[in-house]
Amino acid sequence: MARKLDSDLDGGLYIVATPIGNMGDITLRAIEILGKVDAIACEDTREAGKLTSYHGLETQKIPYHDHNADEMRPKLIRMLKEGQRIALISDAGMPLISDPGYKLVDAVVAEGIYVTCVPGATATLTALVLSALPSDKFMFAGFLPPKSAARKSALTDVKSVPCTLIFYETAPRLAESLRDMAEILGNRRAAVARELTKKFEEIRRDTLTALADHYDAEGAPKGEIVVVVEGPGAGDGDIWTVDATDALLLKMMDDEGMGVKDAAGFVAAKSGQRKSDLYQRALLLKGKK
């Protein structure tokens, strides 16, 4: 449904992007709309309160999140049918990215109610731009599963996708997740972006194995984390999938006559993977023969 946005602000749903860290990263239009709507539907009223207080707004806030979405959605639809104006925001960035907002938008569209988007900050694109990896084609894959087996399965599903991959990850799982990425995707170039737009913003760029080693040694970092990984064959070097690694280990041991230790050292130097991991892998391969 098309409708002109005038100064009086028509009834309907306004999807509004909010800052991902720096409070100044919000558009003038977003501030205007958040001040004029009848209510703001938000994940956390306390987080929303910080934003509205900063910009001197006193708009009513209604909690809308994973745990109450099914209950609140009909109430919000009823308010919209009455002609009220509701802004939908997330805790940070663009709503609907890894939150339940899309279900509300789907329901609003099905009812023929006016809906529009006020664009702005998003951690996904900010991390992609800062990663220094190809940005002409990319895929946002959201959060990976918390368990390693499920995570590896999810990574297997996307390892052949011919574009840069973008993931969200939690700090406690970061090193383990990077290690699984290196095993399934190969030792690709990657970037870990955290605390984006904030005072201690950090972008660490290296191979997946080197990044995993860093966070193993340093411990879990603070802040919200985005991991950006190059696509298959995007870099100048080899892509070290499990099959490619095993093939070279076997070649060094069988064709070149190297022992397990020397073969592991050779492949570690060539691929950037940990020698201890390759040694165990070589032992396993040797035992299968």
Image (cartoon, grey):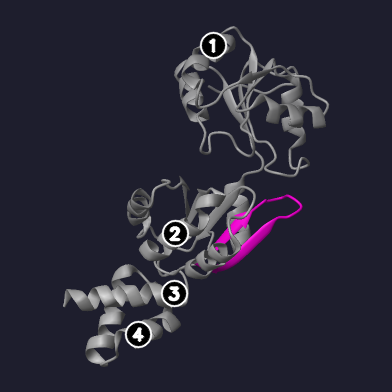
Between disc 4 and disc 2, the foreground one is: 4
Q: Which is closer to the viewer, label 1 or label 4?
A: 4
- Mark positioned earlier in the residue sequence (1 or 4): 1
- Distance of label 1 from label 3 (alpha carbons): 55 Å
Amino acid at dot 1: Lys
Residue wearing tag 2: 163
In terms of secondary structure, where does tag 2 sit? loop
Q: Nearer the viewer, mark 4 or mark 3?
A: 4
Q: What amino acid type should be assigned to the residue bearing mark 2?
A: Cys
In the image, which disc is placed on residue 274?
A: 3
Q: Which one is earlier in the sequence, the residue at label 1 or at label 3?
A: 1
Q: In which quarter of the image is residue 283?
A: bottom left
Residues packed near mark 1 inside 10 Å, few (<14), some (14 to 19) or many (20 plus): few
**Residue at left 51%, top 17%?**
73
**Residue at the spot 71% in from the left edge and 50% down from the top edge:** 197
Residue at 54% across / 9% down in the picture?
Answer: 78
Q: Which residue is drawn at 16% across and 78% down?
A: 289
Observer-nearest residue: 200 or 74?
Answer: 200
The crowding category of the residue bearing disc 4, from other C-alpha atoms within 10 Å (few below 14, some 14 to 19, many at least 20), is some
Q: Which of marks 4 and 2 is nearer the N terminus?
A: 2
Residue underneath mark 1: 75
Amino acid type, label 4: Lys
In magenta stretch: residue 37: no
